[in-house]
Image (cartoon, grey):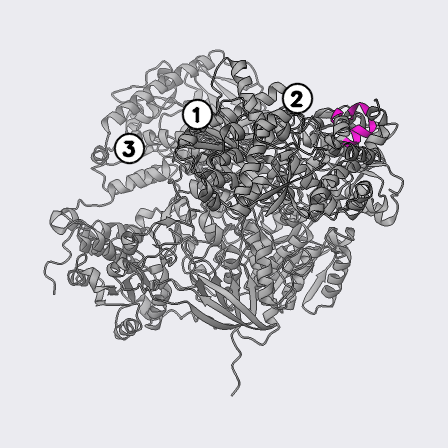
């Protein structure tokens, strides 16, 4: 049975309520630190690592923006563990990426109390800044989005969010529930013994289950899935050939921003910035000779295909690649469409479970036999 | 079947030979045996087992050894050289010596006239084919007598002499 | 050469035309035959061999000693007689005790057995002593254009170390070569080496099954070959294969089974020009067609 | 002047896999080997097998050396074998052997092939024009060949020969031969050689369908084939391109029967032995038939005992039956009848229903075995020895590979038909024995190859020298324009010079190249020549002499392109392919590759010349002594306080007259005395780290309760096993129910008195060969039970002794013990797994009821003793030892060798070996053989010769490695590990086989196979696609 704690708040006081919650947790020693979205002094909302609870006033977890996929941040903090108990408030796409990074030994959740939150989408960074400047609050967004409308002042949440089937995060210790919880209330749901212990230590009692939640979540997921199918179908139709694909990425300038933004592109230094792709003049001339012309910079489609072959098995569909592109190349559908096929091939879903082994790292008994002859 | 009831040394009475002990029940004898087509079938391999196990009663009541056509194909094919045809004859002998009803009537005929059937009496037919009269033992009473005298010294005739001395 | 002819019982009693054929053909080929006066049953496997060693081997000894007294080897046509005599001789030749006992038993005849006499089958004599070439040269008529199939007598094949004379008991060829020597085409068929089914107790204790067993053989001949006749060299095979065809036709209401059966020496006699009425007159399946072809040829 | 010692030379007569293995092992430690084979090819039976149990693939190449493999060349063994130290003489017969131990003179007769195979290009114009057609031996007469033919179609280079029996001497071949290598009047050549030791590996004559009387009941149709012929029928390179068709008319064979024991287990034909391998062979073929022919193929095996005795055999059998639906019928059939529709009828008896059935098959495969006596007699005559009482070559009672004649050894199927694993194992063991023998003689080793130091030139700007051989003038005319080619290549950036020569393979050719290269400023070399398989080594040596680093020399098969052009029937005018272009792009690829290639250098491994042997049983002691005799320091670690292991302390006598306990005492005495052996009793393995040449093992002395460390270069695991435990059949509830070992002990001590016993029953396979049990055959229990039964019989001739068995596993020549037991009146009754005997205790005594299978009747026995054969269990400590060494242990608790067929005593991790029951249950002789083999594999690395890693191994680019460790997980050889202290991925250069899995897996190219960078590969692809004119105007 799920353990829910109801957190009721007065209109306009959601953030305060949550700040109190985490403050209590830190003061009671449930965690030593908190990583969560906070309002920055000048503009915007960013993930912020807090060790002094007195600063929690700026907390704003439901702010509809994700400037950086938090999995990358979590990886930085935990890859070489600090030994400090840390609560992390992250969204589904961040958590799913984090699960993959754990498997790749790039993150470690031993010291982490992972708190996932329901997500109704994020705006592109500049849109969010604009909307904030116009006075939109997280609470107002939540209310409107729960009613089914995310469009606001000519801006809408990102394309990736519109087709995301995972508004509710899994593989977390605690879950901040906002969907189907009724007005002026969110719930904190515990999903693991670690979560139970944290609730208990924080002195929170478990109570009733939010009645309308299950149906509301299901309905939302269904809507998103339909949108996803339609979007991917539209993508596949519009990109039927390698030429069409080439056309799609024609404006690529090899800035590699998409690679930096991608939460599962976990390499320290990409092969594309190594000697392998640093060619000599006669190499360029040779290529030019073969076709008479050579578009510069070279290796752009090759770069995207390579990245796709490397990452599509782990892609969680967060859409940061699209957001990062200075030339507005919509990479997200490309990756999601490929991921759907490649992950499907192995009956794998990035971020679904800590226990599923990543494809191509495990061999069936009889596969290795062909290499070595050994029978296990 | 309880083995404590079976006679472990029966095989020595019936077919006391190393050849029998070589048998490993491979079934080769069965597959080409003409009499294995009979009802009941002659199952040489099974008989060998019964002898080895000492299943006296079952063996005594088994008619199938008499269905053997004596073709000796089993002897040729047996990979262990059990000499199954010899075994069949041995079982018949053991049955005969333990059960007088098993004594073949043919031997009474042979005792009486030297042959299982009347040989040399078809003189007319033979003559028509240009064949000479045949000097059969039937036609040589003194010789036949000697033959009978000789047979009388053999176990089957001496032990069952009443069958031969009716007249 | 001269051999002591052991006729057994069926040949002189039921199929004397075969005896006639043997007596007619062998001397022509240089094999003179002496009679075994006072011979007794071989003995048949169902008789003394099935009761005790003494009576079995004494009878064998009785017969062998007749030929031995003449200083001749024995020639047999009947498969059972051949096998019984040869096995009996084999026992005696390899067991001094048994030989002594037999000599004790046959002493009253005044004969003594040393097992010098060999037991030979007529087909072996024809194959090894006479040879196909001589047969081909001797015959006046031939079987050209006729197809024959062979029924090898099991008793001349198994167990090969005691009764055999073929190079391979699994691939016998003597009768085929001998038949071909007279100009016939010999057809192979799948069940060539299957027993005729006629010997021993099988056909008496399981008549229906035994008939079915032989039927499979005849069916194979009919379906797989162009056989005009079956060649045998054993009286049991001859009588059984000849007689069963009528039974089968009656049982099935057909005339499907009508392949004439000949003893090899009968065909030989016909090719040598002997009177068919004397050498090949007794049969169930009519032989006219084949005989007419031979005599006409 | 001191006289130079002669080079240790060994004749290996027979080039099947056991002979090849022995030859390679000897060559690798520096001896000169003459490898002969009477047939025109090498490879023996295995050349014909495409698929081997249990993987159903080939894997022959795995018998090649694993470390520094470039020095033996690593390539497909089905194509051929090349080794510097091995002189291969196919088609050569051993005619005589004279002399004494260590000094043999052998006369050989090298038969004429009529074709100079060194110069033949193997393209087979001669075959095309030859008018003769005759049955092809390779495909068992299922196909036809010409009088001039390729004895093995897939060997490289093609070793053609002319069969003079069928040749009509028409001379057509001589006319068309482009290289003029056919000499129809060539003659056999007699050779006389001095050798120090001899390994006989000729195999034995095999039963065939032509020469044997008992086969005639079967050989009634071309669709009745031997199991080897069937192997050709299903082979992809065989008669029907791998589809299963019957030979008579080529129609699909959907119903196939296998008939076991063809020619074997036949007292009547004087062949009372089992041929050992046929059961697995038939199972494998039946499975393959299903796999290749589809599910509708019905496969039936007629058998007597399914002898699935080896490691993993039983599981294969289970899969064959349960998963593939192979049908098994326990009935030996007399023969087969050919029906008019060409189908084959077999009549068999089903004991369960006591009914006869007649089944028709499309094909019948006869599992034909060995006919050994003739071969053994012939070899015995040659060696001037007498065959033993078994009519076989007389061998040492304990050492299967050691002949009583000193300096002569045997391996492979001369020991009785062997499967691949035994053949390979015996080849290594024979090499080990030879090496031990030669170590006592005054002979030298061949000099080790000098590995040149890296030079500054290697790091200069890449400059490629191109040397091309025109091969034969006759050919290049019509295909490749060498002038244009040379001019084109010379123009390329980074090409320093282009030389076009003729007959590079000739001595003059070589000298010319040497002279040219001596003047060269280039630091990279590309040679375009022919037969790279054959000439690679000599051309590489040439390059070395000229001062080029080995990794910067490429040799490419230019001749194939030239030849393809020559034989392309298409005339130039109708668009014949541009072969000059083809050659240009190919060579250009190599040039681009060379330009980007770094100079790679091998690493000379530092080897600690000490060995660790784990386990002081007979196998362990034997291995330790074998090494110590050759001067290797050995640490022998035994967990108990005494030597001998299970067999050496429990088994006084074996049925074949061996006395393990006294033998173990003898070995223990030698171990204790030997100056090179240090014994560590009461010691357990705790942990090990390191790699070949440098292991460090932490050991716990249990009695002293302290730990210590041993450093060693290699280790042998010989942890043994013991009798299995059971609680089946009321064991433990009656003192009349004992295990075989308890009976043996009781009989020896007199505690068990069988003198008065009336009935004794033994049950075999207790807890064995079943799921949820020992899912394997323990191999020794049937023979053990027979030995005990015979011992009882000796004490009590009147007792009735029954052995209830599933399959009597008296494989090979041990069949004689089964026969002996039956003759002693011991009654064998089979039972099936789904109808096991039932044991009840009545008044404390066992009563056994079972279904008698022959009569299909319920039977009951009330024995005085019930003896249970409980099989062999692995040592429980195997798991800890395995963990300590990082070695795999299978679900049964036995160690998993590197390759069940080709590397039977090795682990994938180089430097670690396994011997004896630690590997799987086996007989004492087999354990000793394995110990010898494991010791030799160890010795090969510890002998003091330099051990180099290969040029081409995998490496890690630390700067871009993210330590995700996927490569560690994926490496099939365990060559990669993550060192926590260093926070780095470490590659064990000796173990890495450059398979490339890590490079494929690594997302970021941090794992790379040296010399195979992406940059190189991409450059080669670019070159292959280049379209620029080869040369506009030739110079």
Say which of D318 and D95 sits in front. D95
Residue found 26% across the figure and 31% down from its top: A330
Rate crowding at label 2 as few (under 14), some (14 to 19) or many (20 or more) other CA atoms within 10 Å. Answer: some
Which x, y percent locates residue D916? 65, 52
State whether residue D964 appears in this view.
Answer: no
Chain under label 1?
C
Name which quarter of the figure residue D535 lies in. Answer: bottom left
Of the residues tagged 1 and 2, which is closer to the observer? 1
Residue range (magenta): B93-107
**Disc marking residue A331:** 3
As measured in the structure, the alpha-carbon distance from the residue carrying label 1 to the one carrying label 2 is 32 Å
**Disc marking residue C289:** 1
Rate crowding at label 1 as few (under 14), some (14 to 19) or many (20 or more) other CA atoms within 10 Å. Answer: few
Quarter of the image with the C terminus of chain A in it: top right
- Element type where label 3 sits in the image: loop
- Element type where label 2 sits in the image: helix
Say which of A233 and D44 sits in front. D44
- Element type where label 1 sits in the image: helix
Name which quarter of the figure residue D479 lies in. Answer: bottom left
Would you place residue D107 above or below residue C284 in this image? below
Residue at label 2?
A: C204
As measured in the structure, the alpha-carbon distance from the residue carrying label 3 to the one carrying label 2 is 93 Å
Would you place residue D726 above or below residue D751 in this image? above
Q: Name the side, left or right, on which D735 lies relative to D888.
A: right
Chain under label 2?
C
């Amino acid at each position: 049975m799920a353990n829910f704690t109801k957190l009721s708040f007065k209109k306009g006081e959601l953030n305060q309520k949550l700040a109190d919650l985490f403050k209590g947790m830190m003061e009671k020693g449930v965690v030593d630190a908190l990583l969560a979205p906070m309002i920055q002094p000048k503009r915007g909302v960013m993930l912020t690592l807090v060790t002094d609870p007195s600063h929690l006033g700026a907390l704003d977890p439901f702010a509809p923006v994700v400037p950086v996929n938090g999995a990358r941040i979590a990886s930085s903090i935990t890859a070489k563990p600090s030994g400090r108990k840390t609560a992390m408030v992250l969204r589904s796409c961040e958590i799913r990426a984090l699960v993959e990074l754990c498997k790749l030994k790039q993150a470690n959740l031993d010291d982490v109390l992972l708190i996932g939150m329901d997500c109704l989408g994020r705006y592109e960074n500049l849109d969010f800044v604009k909307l904030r400047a116009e006075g939109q609050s997280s609470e107002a967004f939540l209310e409107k989005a729960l009613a089914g409308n995310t469009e606001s002042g000519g801006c809408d949440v990102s394309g990736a969010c519109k087709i995301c089937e995972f508004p509710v995060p899994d593989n977390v210790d605690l879950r901040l529930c906002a969907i189907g919880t009724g007005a002026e209330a969110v719930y904190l749901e515990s999903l693991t013994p670690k979560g139970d212990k944290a609730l208990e230590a924080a002195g929170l009692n478990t109570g009733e289950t939010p009645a309308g939640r299950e149906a509301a979540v299901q309905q939302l997921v269904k809507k998103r899935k339909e949108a996803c199918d339609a979007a991917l179908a539209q993508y596949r139709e519009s990109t039927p050939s390698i030429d069409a694909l080439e056309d799609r990425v024609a404006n690529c300038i090899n800035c590699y921003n998409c690679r930096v933004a991608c939460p599962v592109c976990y390499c320290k230094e990409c092969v594309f910035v190594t000697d392998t792709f640093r060619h000599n003049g006669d190499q360029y001339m040779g290529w030019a000779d073969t076709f008479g012309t050579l578009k510069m910079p070279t290796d752009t489609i090759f770069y995207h295909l390579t990245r796709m072959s490397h990452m599509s098995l782990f892609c969680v569909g967060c859409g940061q690649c699209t957001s990062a592109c200075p030339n507005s190349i919509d990479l997200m559908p490309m990756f999601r469409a490929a991921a759907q096929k490649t992950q499907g091939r192995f009956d794998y879903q990035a971020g679904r479970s800590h226990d599923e082994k990543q494809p191509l790292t495990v061999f069936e008994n009889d596969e290795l036999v062909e290499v070595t002859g050994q029978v296990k | 079947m309880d083995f404590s009831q079976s006679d472990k040394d029966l095989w020595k009475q019936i077919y006391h030979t190393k050849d029998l002990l070589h048998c490993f029940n491979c079934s080769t004898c069965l597959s080409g045996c003409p009499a294995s087509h009979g009802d009941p079938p002659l199952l040489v391999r099974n008989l060998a087992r019964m002898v080895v196990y000492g299943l006296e009663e079952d063996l005594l009541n088994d008619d199938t050894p008499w269905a053997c056509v004596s073709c000796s194909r089993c002897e040729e094919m047996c990979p262990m050289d059990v000499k199954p045809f010899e075994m069949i004859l041995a079982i018949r002998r053991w049955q005969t010596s333990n059960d007088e009803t098993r004594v073949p009537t043919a031997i009474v005929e042979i005792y009486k006239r030297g042959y299982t059937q009347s040989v040399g009496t078809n003189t007319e037919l033979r003559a028509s084919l240009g064949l000479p009269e045949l000097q059969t033992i039937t036609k040589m009473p003194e010789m036949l007598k000697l033959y009978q005298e000789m047979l009388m010294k053999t176990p089957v005739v001496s032990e069952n002499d009443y069958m031969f001395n009716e007249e | 050469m001269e051999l002591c002819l052991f006729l057994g019982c069926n040949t002189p009693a039921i199929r004397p035309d075969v005896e006639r054929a043997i007596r007619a053909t062998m001397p022509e080929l240089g094999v003179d035959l002496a009679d075994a006066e006072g011979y007794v049953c071989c003995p048949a496997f169902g008789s003394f061999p099935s009761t005790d060693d003494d009576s079995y081997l004494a009878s064998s000894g009785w017969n062998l000693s007749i030929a031995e007294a003449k200083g001749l080897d024995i020639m047999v046509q009947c498969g059972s007689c051949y096998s019984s005599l040869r096995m009996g001789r084999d026992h005696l030749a390899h067991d001094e005790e048994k030989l002594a006992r037999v000599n004790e038993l046959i002493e009253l005849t005044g004969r003594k057995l040393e097992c010098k006499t060999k037991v030979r089958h007529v087909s072996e004599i024809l194959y090894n002593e006479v040879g196909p070439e001589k047969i081909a040269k001797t015959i006046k008529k031939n079987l050209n254009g006729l197809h024959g199939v062979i029924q090898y007598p099991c008793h001349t094949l198994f167990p090969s170390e005691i009764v055999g004379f073929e190079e391979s008991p699994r691939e016998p060829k003597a009768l085929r070569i001998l038949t071909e020597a007279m100009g016939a085409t010999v057809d192979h068929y799948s069940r060539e080496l299957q027993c005729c089914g006629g010997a021993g107790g099988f056909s008496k204790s399981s008549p229906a099954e035994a008939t079915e067993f032989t039927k499979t053989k005849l069916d194979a001949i009919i379906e797989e070959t162009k056989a005009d006749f079956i060649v045998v060299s054993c009286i049991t095979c001859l009588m059984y294969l000849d007689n069963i065809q009528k039974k089968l036709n009656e049982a099935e209401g057909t005339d499907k089974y009508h392949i004439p059966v000949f003893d090899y020496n009968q065909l030989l006699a016909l090719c040598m020009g002997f009177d068919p009425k004397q050498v090949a007159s007794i049969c169930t399946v009519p032989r006219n067609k084949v005989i007419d072809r031979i005599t006409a040829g | 002047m001191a006289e130079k010692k002669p080079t240790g030379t060994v004749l290996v007569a027979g080039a099947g896999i056991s002979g090849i293995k022995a030859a390679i092992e000897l060559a690798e430690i520096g001896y000169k080997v003459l490898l002969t084979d009477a047939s025109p090819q090498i490879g023996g039976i295995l050349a014909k097998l495409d698929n081997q149990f249990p993987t159903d693939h080939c894997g022959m190449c795995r018998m090649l050396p694993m470390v520094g493999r470039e020095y033996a060349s690593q390539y497909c063994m089905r194509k051929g074998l090349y080794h510097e130290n091995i002189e291969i003489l196919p088609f050569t017969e051993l005619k005589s052997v004279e002399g004494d131990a260590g000094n043999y003179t052998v006369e050989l007769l090298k038969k004429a092939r009529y074709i100079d195979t060194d110069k033949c290009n193997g393209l087979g114009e001669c075959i095309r024009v030859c008018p003769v057609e005759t049955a092809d031996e390779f495909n068992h007469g299922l196909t036809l060949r010409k009088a001039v033919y390729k004895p093995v179609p897939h060997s490289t280079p093609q070793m053609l020969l002319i069969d003079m029996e069928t040749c009509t001497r028409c001379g057509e071949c001589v006319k068309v031969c482009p290289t003029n290598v056919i000499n129809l009047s060539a003659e056999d050549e007699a050779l006389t050689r001095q050798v120090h030791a001899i390994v006989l590996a000729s195999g034995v004559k095999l039963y065939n369908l032509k020469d044997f009387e008992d086969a005639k009941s079967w050989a009634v149709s071309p669709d009745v084939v031997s199991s080897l012929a069937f192997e050709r029928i299903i082979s992809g390179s065989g008669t029907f391109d791998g589809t299963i068709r019957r030979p008579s008319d080529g129609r699909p064979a959907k119903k196939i029967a296998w008939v076991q024991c063809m020619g074997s287990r036949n007292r009547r034909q004087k062949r009372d032995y089992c041929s050992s391998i046929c059961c697995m062979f038939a199972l494998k073929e039946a499975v393959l038939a299903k796999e290749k022919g589809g599910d509708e193929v019905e496969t039936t095996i007629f058998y007597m005992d399914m002898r699935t005795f080896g490691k993993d055999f039983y599981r294969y059998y289970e899969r064959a039956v349960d998963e593939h639906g192979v049908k098994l019928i326990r009935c030996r059939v007399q023969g087969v009848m050919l029906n008019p529709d060409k189908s084959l009828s077999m009549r068999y008896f089903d004991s369960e229903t006591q009914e006869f059935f007649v089944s028709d098959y499309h094909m019948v495969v006869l599992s034909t075995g060995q006919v050994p006596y003739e071969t053994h007699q012939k070899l015995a005559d040659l060696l001037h020895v007498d065959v033993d009482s078994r009519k076989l070559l007389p061998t040492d009672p304990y050492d299967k590979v050691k002949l009583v004649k000193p300096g002569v050894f045997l391996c492979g199927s001369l020991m009785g038909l062997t499967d691949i694993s035994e053949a390979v194992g015996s080849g290594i063991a024979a090499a080990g024995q030879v090496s031990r023998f030669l170590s006592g003689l005054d002979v030298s080793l061949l000099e080790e190859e000098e590995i040149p130091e890296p030079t500054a030139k290697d790091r200069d700007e890449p400059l490629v020298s191109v040397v091309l051989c025109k091969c034969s003038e006759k050919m290049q005319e019509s295909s490749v324009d060498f002038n244009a080619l040379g001019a084109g290549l010379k123009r390329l950036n980074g090409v320093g010079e282009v030389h076009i020569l003729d007959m590079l393979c000739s001595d003059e050719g070589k000298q010319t190249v040497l002279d040219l290269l001596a003047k060269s400023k280039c630091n990279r070399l590309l040679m375009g020549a022919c037969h790279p398989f054959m000439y690679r080594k000599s051309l590489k040596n040439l390059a070395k002499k000229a001062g080029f680093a080995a990794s910067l020399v490429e040799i490419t098969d230019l001749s194939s392109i030239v030849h393809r052009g020559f034989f392309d029937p298409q005339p130039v005018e109708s668009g014949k392919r541009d072969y000059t272009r083809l050659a240009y792009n190919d060579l250009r690829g190599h040039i681009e590759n060379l330009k980007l290639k770094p100079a790679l250098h091998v690493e000379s491994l530092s080897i600690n010349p000490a060995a660790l042997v784990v386990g002081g049983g007979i196998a362990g002691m034997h291995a330790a002594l074998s090494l110590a005799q050759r001067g290797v320091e050995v640490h022998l670690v035994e967990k108990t306080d005494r030597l001998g292991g299970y067999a050496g302390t429990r088994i006084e006598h074996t049925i074949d007259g061996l006395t393990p306990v006294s033998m173990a005492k003898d070995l223990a005495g030698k171990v204790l005395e030997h100056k090179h052996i240090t014994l560590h009793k009461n010691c357990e393995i705790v942990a090990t780290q390191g790699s070949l040449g440098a292991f460090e093992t932490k050991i716990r002395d249990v009695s002293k309760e302290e730990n210590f460390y041993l450093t060693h270069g290699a280790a042998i695991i010989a942890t043994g096993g013991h009798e299995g435990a059971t609680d089946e059949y009321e064991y433990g509830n009656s003192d009349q129910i004992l295990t075989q070992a308890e009976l043996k002990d009781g009989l020896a001590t007199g505690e068990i008195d069988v003198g008065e016993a009336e009935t004794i029953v033994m049950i075999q396979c207790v807890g064995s060969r079943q799921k949820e049990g020992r899912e394997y055959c323990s191999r020794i229990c049937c023979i053990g039970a027979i030995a005990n039964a015979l011992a009882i019989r000796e004490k009590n001739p009147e007792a009735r002794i029954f052995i209830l068995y599933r399959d009597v596993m008296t494989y090979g020549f041990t069949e004689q013990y089964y026969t002996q037991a039956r003759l002693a009146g011991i009654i064998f009754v089979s039972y099936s797994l789904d109808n096991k005997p039932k044991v009840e205790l009545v008044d404390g005594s066992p009563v056994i009821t079972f279904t008698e299978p022959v009569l299909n009747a319920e039977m009951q026995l009330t024995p005085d003793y019930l003896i249970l054969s409980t099989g062999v269990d692995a040592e429980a400590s195997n798991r800890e030892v395995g963990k300590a060494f990082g070695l795999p242990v299978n679900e049964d608790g036995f160690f998993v060798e590197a390759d069940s067929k080709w590397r039977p005593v090795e682990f994938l991790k180089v430097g670690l070996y396994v011997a004896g029951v630690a590997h799987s249950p086996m007989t004492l002789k087999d354990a000793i053989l394995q110990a010898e083999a494991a010791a030799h594999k160890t010795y090969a690395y510890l002998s003091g010769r330099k051990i180099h890693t290969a040029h081409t191994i995998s490496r890690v680019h630390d700067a871009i490695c993210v330590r995700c460790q996927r490569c560690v997980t994926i490496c099939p050889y365990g060559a990669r590990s993550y060192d926590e202290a260093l926070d780095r991925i470490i590659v064990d250069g000796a173990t890495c086989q450059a398979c490339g899995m890590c490079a494929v897996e690594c997302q970021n190219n941090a794992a790379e196979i040296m010399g195979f960078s992406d940059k190189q590969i991409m450059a080669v692809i670019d070159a292959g696609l280049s379209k620029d004119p080869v040369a506009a105007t030739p110079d």
